[in-house]
Image (cartoon, rainbow, N blue to C red):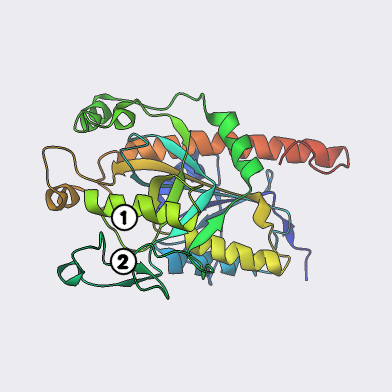
């Protein structure tokens, strides 16, 4: 059996639209059969990069990441993992077209739930932590996969490298921002920020749900996390990576998660929640194309820096000392 291919970096996208820029521009031109995954892998052997498309949702992401991690063709033991996708954005903290680097990822599907028409009057939500009797009951208890924390030093490094980057802006984004006059951050041009991700397969929308999401993030992170973006896969990917780390097939300390904002998580002033959600059709999100561009622009900057430093240090026979 040939020696496994040593991977320097895995770029994780969730669907083909996110992956296309990496395939064409990075590039990741080679296609490799991947029967256990959602789609064929893409590779750049010269750089030591593998591109993985997981499929949409936490379960698909967990299965695809685990399948790659256990694939005997690859040595991923010291690879960096860059999860680079698009998602919703909290207008209280971020604007469309922006990119957020997450230190905390909190799952929003592991809950008890009572229909909104039956919740007690004194409750703010019908969503209750597992094994608790009321919303946000303290203490939270042990996480069963509700909360994940990334390497803070690595996140700070990636944010510091990209925080001053200029991202695409256009009149369409400005028009979207204008619908949120009461939210100063939502009216800013696209930028790179630090902000955390709520992950789950429920595509929620609206001001009431946004209030719950903000509290849910704070609840599971003891007030340390700040809800900035929504996603559908990241908690599943991190679960797989943590287990691969336990098996010494991945390094959980070398994982980054970034999300570019393609739509706001609640409605503008001139629409109700249902009208706003109806406007967000698949592949037609308010800022779909600018978010894809921003995700690649920011993600590729970090990817190239990681690869340059790794290869430089490998040539001189040293460990990577200047990456967290």
Give the camera-side residue of 16 and 309.
309
In the rendered structure, the answer to whether residue 223 lies left or right of residue 186 reads right
Residue 127, which numbered label? Answer: 2
On screen, residue 133 above or below 184: below
Q: CA distance from mark 2 to mark 1?
A: 9 Å
Q: From the image, tell me which residue sits under label 1.
A: 212
Name the spot of residue 77 as percent of width and height, x first.
73, 59
In the rendered structure, the answer to whether residue 126 lies left or right of residue 31 reads left
Q: Secondary structure at mark 2?
A: strand
The residue drawn where x is 59% and y is 41% is: 155
Name the spot of residue 214 as percent of width and height, x first.
36, 49
Residue 33 visible in rendering:
no
In the rendered structure, the answer to whether residue 301 lies left or right of residue 313 reads left
Name the spot of residue 46 as percent of width and height, x first.
69, 44
Q: Are marks 2 and 1 in contact (CB under 8 Å)?
A: yes
Give the camera-side residue of 225 and 230.
225
Task: Name the residue at the right extreme.
Answer: 317
The residue drawn where x is 44% and y is 50% is: 197
Q: Secondary structure at mark 1?
A: helix
On screen, residue 52 above or below 94: below
On screen, residue 87 above or below 313: below
Residue 101 visible in rendering:
yes
Residue 63, which numbered label? Answer: none
Point out the image quarter for the C terminus: top right
Task: Name the residue at the bottom extreme.
Answer: 131
């Amino acid at each position: 059996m040939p020696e496994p291919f040593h991977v320097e970096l895995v770029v994780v996208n969730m669907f083909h639209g996110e992956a296309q820029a990496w395939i064409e521009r990075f590039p990741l031109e080679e296609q490799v059969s991947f029967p256990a995954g959602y789609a064929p892998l893409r590779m750049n052997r010269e750089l030591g990069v593998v591109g993985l498309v997981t499929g949409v949702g936490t379960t698909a992401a967990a299965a695809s990441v685990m399948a790659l991690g256990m694939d005997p063709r690859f040595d991923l033991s010291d690879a960096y993992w860059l999860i680079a996708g698009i998602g919703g954005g909290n207008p209280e903290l971020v604007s469309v077209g922006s990119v957020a680097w997450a230190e905390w990822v909190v799952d929003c599907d592991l809950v008890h739930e009572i229909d909104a028409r039956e919740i007690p009057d004194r409750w703010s939500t019908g969503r209750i932590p597992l094994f608790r009797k009321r919303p946000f009951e303290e203490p939270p208890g042990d996480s069963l996969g509700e909360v994940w924390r990334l390497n803070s030093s690595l996140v700070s490094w990636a944010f510091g490298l990209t925080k001053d980057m200029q991202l695409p802006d256009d009149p369409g984004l400005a028009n979207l921002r204008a619908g949120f006059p009461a939210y100063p951050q939502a009216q800013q041009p696209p930028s790179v920020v630090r902000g955390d991700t709520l992950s789950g397969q429920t595509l929620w929308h609206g001001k009431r749900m946004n209030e719950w999401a903000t509290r849910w993030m704070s609840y599971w992170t003891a007030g340390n996390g700040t809800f900035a973006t929504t996603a559908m896969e990241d908690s599943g990917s991190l679960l797989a990576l943590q287990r691969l780390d336990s098996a010494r097939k991945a390094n959980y300390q070398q994982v980054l998660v970034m999300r570019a904002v393609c739509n706001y998580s609640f409605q503008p002033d001139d629409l109700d929640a249902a009208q706003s959600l109806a406007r967000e059709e698949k592949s037609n999100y308010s800022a779909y194309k600018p978010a894809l561009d921003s995700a690649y622009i920011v993600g590729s900057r970090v990817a190239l820096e990681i690869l340059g430093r790794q290869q430089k240090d490998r040539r001189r026979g040293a460990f990577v000392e200047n990456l967290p």
